Image (spheres, grey):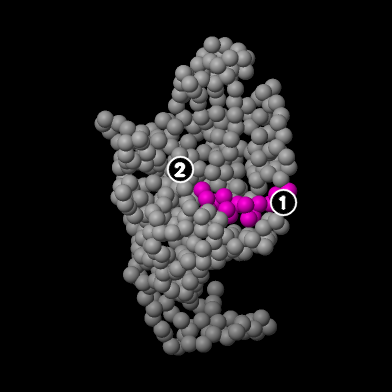
Amino acid sequence: MTLPSWCRSTTTTTTTVSSAATMPSLRHSYTVTVPEELPAALPADKPELRRKSPSLSRTKLVSTFMGLIINQAKNKGPQGLVGLRNLGNTCFMNSILQCLSNTPELRDYCLRNIHRTDLNNNCKTNAALMEEFAKLTQSLWTSVNTEAISPSDFRSQIQRYAPKFVGCNQQDAQEFLRFLLDGLHNEVNRVTVRPKVSVEDFDHLSDDEKGKRMWNMYLEREDSKVVDLFVGQLKSSVTCTVCGFRSTVFDPFWDLSIPVAQKNSGEVTLKDCMRLFTKEDVLDGEERPTCNRCKARRKCTKRFSIQKFPQILVLHLKRFSDSNIRASKLSTFVNFPLKELDLREFASESSERAIYNLYAVSNHSGNTLGGHYTAYCRNPALGEWYSYNDSRVSPVPSSQVRSSNAYVLFYELTSSPHSKYQTCRL
């Protein structure tokens, strides 16, 4: 294969891209050869231009194209490696925004302005939250430099939607995430007229069929790109200890708040926390429910399992506890995998595939009296981990992503997006 003469520059400009430059993910330095002038287009009717050009060695050819690719990436800017200014105790907001910005499908949804086609007809005159979130995401990914961006316009809109975030008080990042996703969903909900909630008896159906019916009923009211990504379905089974009757309830979830397991010795793993969340609990005393078969309040057992795994699984480690005496925080180190988190043992059906890869972590350092939020995110374009500390963005080794400050974990399903039953109706 030969290249036209315009690819062989007589004037060579050498550009070095290293880990300290705009794209710190490129660990090696490359010499980029840039032609002095490039024609607007190569004439298709003059093949002699190619025939007369001397052939290039394969090594030179690869180097040329590698240089062009790097130069193109450099021209695109820092590609998501842009910080957010702290507007006064807004580190909780910045941490979550960076995690969401590095959620590939949500990022692309904003970059391509697809959200505008999904704007709910009832919200088109009041869809400022989604629009500002999209604008902020676009700024983070299309900025031509690494100068930190002020999220003030977005902050104004989230404060209008959720007044509890007005002011400069310290806030909880997981609570902020729930409010934000709810607000974004409401503005791009594909359902314009919600049907009335119907009360149907599904007890005669199998658990699997009942779960599908309940999921379809949910989608008849709540159906958006945000739901497509973040919402799963939780199964709650309650069994009467007297007659053995078992009732099941299926509820959607946007994230799972899981307790932090405690051990006298040995490390605590994420699966230990999941097992604590799904372990069988006894409902007795004032907590005794009414058995549908006995028609009386009975001692029962209750257990959670996951009926439908979401594409994006958000796991909230319950480090904070409020008691009548004082609030406290658990600083237990929880060992969680960066790749191939297998959650099949927590599925309501063992055949359900549930393998996840970590791509973002919201961290909290400090205690209940004061602290600071940061984020570790795996850049989807570059494939490497970065630390987001308000305005500062820097590379971080994957070995440092696990820490006792990990608070909210963001995992992405590795298999096809919807492995059990999709977000479409069945």
Q: Tell me the element at label 2.
A: strand
Verify whether residue 257 appears in magenta.
Answer: no
Q: Residue 315 bears which disc, if any?
A: 2
* In this view, the mark in front (2 or 1): 1
Evaluate whether residue 354 shows in this view.
yes
Task: Give the residue drawn at x 52%, y 50%.
Answer: 179
Number of disc labels: 2
Query: Could you tell me which quadrant the C terminus lies in?
Result: top right
* Label 2 crowd (10 A; few <14 / some 14-19 / many >=20): many
Q: Is residue 147 above or below residue 344?
A: below
Residue type at the position of mark 1: Thr
Q: Is residue 132 above or below residue 1?
A: above
Query: Could you tell me which quadrant the N terminus lies in?
Result: bottom right
Verify whether residue 188 appears in magenta.
Answer: yes
User: Mark 1 sits on what residue?
Assistant: 192
Q: Which residues are magenta?
A: 178-193
Task: Give the residue drawn at x 48%, y 40%.
Answer: 256
In the image, taking residue 389 as reference, residue 73 lies left or right, namely right
Q: Residue furthest top?
A: 242
Residue 262 versus residue 284: which sits nearer the camera?
284
Picture coordinates of residue 390 (x, y %)? 38, 62
Picture coordinates of residue 129 (x, y %)? 57, 60
Picture coordinates of residue 278 (x, y %)? 46, 30
In the image, taking residue 40 as reference, residue 356 lies left or right, namely left
Q: Tell me the element at label 1.
A: loop
